[in-house]
Image: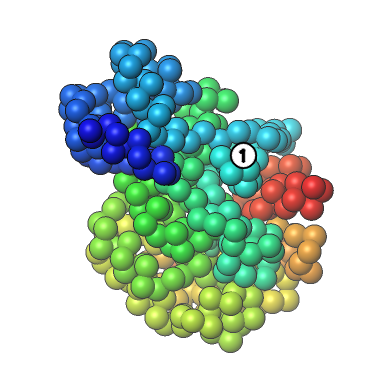
């Protein structure tokens, strides 16, 4: 009976988006033993099984039942570029519905890091960003976020020590799936990645920053600030029409106080737009009370956008100004510039071509 009920569902359940507890509940209700849930969960999230048939310690009848009742989400790699400069690898994946997303694999001294996308496209409209040019197509499922990491691990055979949710999309605009992703990725029965090694980047959706703080994760939160006055921020980031910098700062302070995790401000330097010494002074005034780390990013030129990078001497004086005010500053290394490095450019090139 329970099995018929399972079969009667028109849309199959996306098994890789379930927590182990959710999976257990469904399996037990359909007459299976409880321990099957942890076996299957392990196959999906630790062994990275390619399909149900690879789950060799399950009876064939159960594998068939899973096949009949669940969607086993996999991504198809349609393009892979490997940088000759620094070993960065960019992947373009087709989702089950043939939408495309990008993910990036980066080698650092401290380990390997993957940058994943959280949405197909984006509706935030930041003027300097290629990911938002075609608007938002849809949210990614939890399984589709996880599979970007799993598929890169299958393809490269490399170990992954860090994950950043900094690819295409605004993760806090896909809040529920993103939070579940963080839970599954860091959960003991799965990849068990330390939450301290996970960073989520947001353009500043204030209510969701409070919600995320209340989840009490130990993940790193990065804010895409990019301007220090509301007027200037509105010129380059439409989200600034909705939330003021002072509201965002309050939310970031709440995140810091609740989780104890240092926060980061990302600041993309655009020549003549936000790179004056006054901007640096404003930035240190915002960063100091929060003890925030500032990550300076030379803007990655996007063909459709007219922005130009701040030149090296101006970057250096901007950085000095911050450091002299006691702010910790890093300059983001430009990874894989020879391979459509900027956010959304690989996908964009494929979409424009087809
Ligand atoms: N929506 C999230 C995460 C995705 S964008 C956010 O806004 O943080 C990841 C980071 O890359 C953000 O800081 C974003 O502002 C920055 N970014 C986007 N396009 C860029 C470009 N052309 N050059 C440099 N940084 C860019």
Mark 1 neighbour class, 10 Å CA radius: few under 14, some 14 to 19, many 20 or more: many
Give whichever of 63, 330 is nearer the camera. Answer: 63
Q: Does residue 315 sit above or below 200 in this rendering?
A: below
Q: Does residue 206 sit above or below 142 in this rendering?
A: below
Q: Which residue is mark 1?
A: 93
How many callouts does the rendering have?
1
The x, y position of residue 330, in whole percent, is 53, 56
Measuring 71% from the left and 47% from the top, which residue is drawn there?
A: 346
Measuring 24% from the left and 24% from the top, which residue is drawn there?
A: 36
Work out which residue is located at the far bottom of the displayed protein and give it: 231
Measuring 40% from the left and 53% from the top, which residue is drawn there?
A: 177
- Left or right: residue 169 compared with residue 347: left
Q: Secondary structure at mark 1?
A: strand
The x, y position of residue 54, in whole percent, is 43, 17
Give whichever of 29, 161 is nearer the camera. Answer: 29
Can see residue 73? yes
Give whichever of 236, 187 is nearer the camera. Answer: 187
The x, y position of residue 316, in whole percent, is 65, 63
Can see residue 299? no
Rendering quarter of residue 11: top left
């Amino acid at each position: 009976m329970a099995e018929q009920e399972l079969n009667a569902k028109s849309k199959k359940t996306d098994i890789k988006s379930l927590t182990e507890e959710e999976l257990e509940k469904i399996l037990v209700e359909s007459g299976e033993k409880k321990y099957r849930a942890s076996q299957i969960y392990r196959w999906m999230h630790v062994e990275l099984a390619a399909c149900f048939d690879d789950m060799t310690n399950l009876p064939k009848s159960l594998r068939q039942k899973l096949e009949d009742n669940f969607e086993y989400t996999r991504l198809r790699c349609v393009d892979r570029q490997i940088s000759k400069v620094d070993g960065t690898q960019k992947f373009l994946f087709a989702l089950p519905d043939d939408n495309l997303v990008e993910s990036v694999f980066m080698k650092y001294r401290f380990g390997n890091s993957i940058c994943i996308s959280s949405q197909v496209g984006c509706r935030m409209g930041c003027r300097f960003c290629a990911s938002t040019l075609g608007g938002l197509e849809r949210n990614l499922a939890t399984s589709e976020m996880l599979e970007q990491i799993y598929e890169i691990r299958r393809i490269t055979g490399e170990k992954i020590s860090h994950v950043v949710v900094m690819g295409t999309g605004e993760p806090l605009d896909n809040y529920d799936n993103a939070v579940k992703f963080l839970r599954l990725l860091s959960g003991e029965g799965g990849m068990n990645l330390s939450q301290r090694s996970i960073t989520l980047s947001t353009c500043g959706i204030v209510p969701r920053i409070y919600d995320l703080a209340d989840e009490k994760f130990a993940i790193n939160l990065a804010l895409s600030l990019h301007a220090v006055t509301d007027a200037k921020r509105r010129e380059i980031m439409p989200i600034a029409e909705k939330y003021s910098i002072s509201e965002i700062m309050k939310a970031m302070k709440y995140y810091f106080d609740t989780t104890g995790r240092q926060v980061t401000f990302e600041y993309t330097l655009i020549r003549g737009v936000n790179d004056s010494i006054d901007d640096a002074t404003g930035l240190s005034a915002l960063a100091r009370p929060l003890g925030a780390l500032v990550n300076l990013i030379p803007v990655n030129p996007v063909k459709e956008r007219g922005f130009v990078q701040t030149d090296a001497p101006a970057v250096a004086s901007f950085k000095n100004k911050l450091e002299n005010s006691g702010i910790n500053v890093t300059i983001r290394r430009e990874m894989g510039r020879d391979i459509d490095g900027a956010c959304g450019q690989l996908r964009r090139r494929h979409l424009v071509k087809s």
